[in-house]
Image (tube, coloured by chain):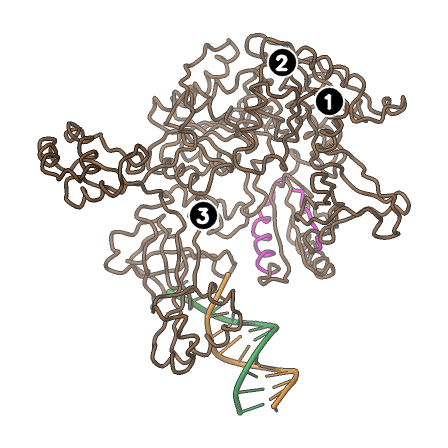
Chain colours: A brown, B orange, C green
Amino acid sequence: MIAEVYIDIPANPVNKPFDYRIPDYLDEVIQPGMRVTVPFGRTRRLGFVTGLKEQSEFKQLRAIDSIEDHAPVLTQELLDVGLWLAEATLCATVTAFQAMLPAAMKAEYKKMLQVEESEQLKAEDPELAKIFETGRQLSWTEITKNNPELLKRINRMLKKGLLSIHQLVQNQANAKKVITVSAAVSSERLKEEVSQLSDRAKRQKEVLNLFIGKSEDASYKPTMNALVQNGLSREAITRLADKSLLRLEQIEQFRDPYANYVQQTQPLDLTDEQHKALAPIMQSMNTGEHRVFLCHGVTGSGKTEIYLQAIQRVLELEKQAIVLVPEISLTPQMVLRFKGRFGDRVAVMHSGLSRGEKYDEWRKIREGKVQVAVGARSAVFAPFKKIGLIIIDEEHESSYKQEDTPRYHARDVAIHRAKIHHCPVVLGSATPSLESFARARKKVYTLLTLKERVNRRPLPSVQVVDLREEMREGNHSVFSRLLLEKLKDRLQKKEQTVLFLNRRGYSTFVMCRSCGTVVKCPHCDISLTYHRAHHLLKCHYCGYEQKAPDTCPTCGSDAMRFFGTGTQKVEAELNRLLPEARVIRMDVDTTRQKGSHEKLLRQFGDEKADILLGTQMIAKGLDFPKVTLVGVLAADSLLHLPDFRASEKTFQLITQVSGRAGRHRLPGEVVIQSYTPDHYAVSDAARHDYEGFYQQEMELRHRGGYPPFFYLALISLTHSEPAKAADAAERIVSILKKNLSEASLVYGPVVPAISKIKDRYRYQCMVKYKREPALIPVLQKIMQHFQESGKDSLQVSIDLNPVVLM
DNA sequence: TGGCAACGGCAT
DNA sequence: TGCCGTTGCCAG
C-alpha cells in the first residue's frame, strides 16, 4: 500500500502530497489523518497521511519510518476542512492541519550525533571522544550552543565517518501518567499475608490493611500520590507490588483545570422572547437542516440560556456542540455556566490553559469523553464526529479572526463545518457585525431578536459628557465633573463602578516640549508608551523597551512631557482624587500571570474593591450585581484610527461596556466621555439604537465601497529594504489590474499607518471585489512568485476579508 | 525547511 | 590548492 503524505514544511514547492510506501508492519495500521515520520530529502520530517492508494506514478518510493499516532488525529472531515481552509486562506496545507491541532502536537526536530568509530575518534580528537564517552546519542544543538568552536571539529569527524547524524522527530504531546494501586489478590489472602509479615514490616502491614475488604471492589484504585499523601510509604507499596500482592498500573490521566468548581444548575424558565428565538433553532436541529441564525439580543437578554437549552437538545439527539466565545471573556463566569449545566460533559479550551491541559481537553473531545466544547477561536476545529450545533457568542468580536497564517475567520469555518454536518449555526450578539446583520436582512441568515432584558430590567441610562466643554471650563482631569461626582456617590453607597479605557500603560507618548521630538521605537514606526512601574518606555508592537529619558535625546532639554492617558495614569489619578477607593486595574500588564485574570475578577466579585479599571478585557461577559455605574473614559479612542470599521468598533465597545451596569436589582447608569459626542457611533450607542447606527453606517460603507458591499483582499509586503518592498508592491498591483475583471478595484501600493514593524518596511495593496473567480488563482500565483524564503527576504502575506487593515 | 553541490573569492 | 561563505536546487 501507498500513503499520500503532506510534509511538515510550509513552503510552496512542497505544498502537495508525497507518495510513500507503507512497510509491511504498518500495513492495515496506517489510516488517513494519522501523523507519520518520513524520510524527506536528506532529513526526517513529520507528515500527515491524507489518503491511501495501491498505485503511484513514482517508481522509487521511500518507506514511512514510523507512526506518531495510534489513532487518526484528524477525521476525514477535518482533513477535508484543512484542504478547503488552505485554499480559502492561501496558506500551505500543513499549516491548516497544524492550526486544527493543539500546540502540543507540533513536532520538534532534533539532530542527534552518535559515535561510529570510537577508537579512531579517540586517536583523532581525544577531547571530542571524551564528550561522546557514553556512546549515547547527543543533541547537536546542545553540544554546539555552548561551544561553537566544536562545530568545525565535529564536521571534520562527520566527513571521516567517525560520527554520524540521526534525525529525531519528537512529538511533544504526552499524556500525564498516574500510577494507580489496587489489590492483586483476594482480601482473604491479604489477611493471611498480614499475619505472616514480620513485626518489623509495620509500613507494609499498614498498606495491606487498607486493601483488606476492598480487593473485590474493582473501582477501588487509589493513585499512588494520594496514598503517599495520606502518609503511606511509597517504598512499602512498591515492595508489596514486587511480591505480586498489589497491582500497580500506569494510566493516562486528564488534567482537569476546572476540577474544583462545579455547581449543578437547572434550566431556567424562558421568557416569551426567548421561547420564540429558541424554537426555530430547535426545529433546525430536529430536522437536521443547516441554517445560520443571527441572535440579536440586547445585553442581559438571556442569550446564554438559549444556548444552554439548545445544547441540551443536542445531547438528547446524541450529537455534540461547539460553543465559541471570545478569548477575552473566557473567564470562569462564562465557563462555569456551561460546566454548571453540563458538568463533565464539557471540555474547555482557551489560552489560559497550559499546553498539556489544552492537549488533554482536546483528547477528551477526540475520544468522545465529552459532548460540548467551549473555547476560543480554534475550538471551531474540535474533532467531534457528529456535530449538532455550533454557537458563536459575541459574533462581532475581532478575535474570531486569526491574525497570522492561516488567516481564517472562525465564523466561516463554523458555517463550512455546519454545512457538512447538516446542523445549525447560531451567531449571537448585542451588536452584530454589519456583515452578519446585512445577511440577516437579506434572509441569508435567520434573524432572531431579543429586545428585552430578562426580569424586565431596564437598559442602563446613558449620559454623554462633552470633554471639550470640560476643557473649556478648566477641567483638565481624566474625569469629567459628572463622572467624578457619581464615582463619589457610589463609593458612599458602597456600590461598584467599572471604568473602561482602551489604552494600557501610563501615557501614550512622550514628547519634548522644547523641540517637539516624540520618542519612537527604533524598530517600528510607532511612538513608545510610558510604563511607570519600572520607569520604562515600551513598544506595544515588538516589545522593545528602554529607560524613560529625563532629557530630550535630540535637543537635551529637560522638558520631556507625557501625553495621552493610559490605565496606569488613571489608576494614579484615582488614588490621588479618591484615596479611600479600592481600585483593581486589569490590563495585559496586570494579567500576564496565569490565573491572575480570574483572581482579580474574583476579588472584585467579592467586593474587595470599589472600582474595576481596565481595557478591552473587561468590556464583556462580566456580570456583577453591585455594579451600578460604568464610565467610558475616552469613547473616541478608537474612532479616529485609519480603519473603515472604526465607527463600528466604537459603537460595539460603548454598547458592550454599558451593558455591564445594572444587570440585577440595582439600576445602572453609564457615563460616556467623548470629544465628539455628536458622532453617530457615540450618540446611537448612548440611545441603545442599533438599527439607527446600522442604517447610517451602511450608508457610509456603501459610499466608500467597503464591506458588506464589497469583499476585500489585503496584500502586505515587508522587507528590510523599503525599495524592495515598494518594487514588489508595484509589480503586484499591475499583475492584479491585468488579471482581474473590470468590476474589481485595485488600490495601492500604499504605506500603511505604521510603516515599519520590527525593522521591516511595509507596503500594502488592496482589492475590492464583489464576484471575482480569478482572484484566488491570481493570488496563489503572486504568492508563488514573490514569496521568498530565507531570513532577509521579501515576505508576502495575503489576508482575505481582513478585520484589521493596519 | 534544510542539506548539499556548485561556485567564487581569498589566503596561503 | 584548500577553505570558507553564499547561492540555488530539490525532496516521493
Q: Are marks 1 and 3 in contact (CB under 8 Å)?
A: no
Report the residue marked by disc 1: A579
Characterize the local packing of mark 3: few (<14), some (14-19) or many (20 or more) Cα atoms within 10 angstroms: many
Kindly state the secondary structure of the residue where label 1 is placed. Answer: loop
In the picture, measured across the screen, residue A503 lies left or right of residue A333, that is right
What chain does mark 2 sit on? A
Badge number at residue A97:
3
Q: Are marks 2 and 3 in contact (CB under 8 Å)?
A: no
Amino acid type of the residue tagged 1 in the rendering: Pro
Please tell me which residue is depicted at 37% across the width and 27% down the height of the picture: A344
* 1 or 2: tag closer to the N-terminus: 1
Image coordinates of residue A369 in percent, x first then y, are 33, 32
Image coordinates of residue A125 in percent, x first then y, are 43, 79
Please tell me which residue is depicted at 50% across the width and 16% down the height of the picture: A277
Residues in magenta, as a range: A761-785
Amino acid type of the residue tagged 2 in the rendering: Gly
Report the residue marked by disc 2: A662
Position of the C terminus of chain A by quadrant: top right
Position of the N terminus of chain A by quadrant: bottom left
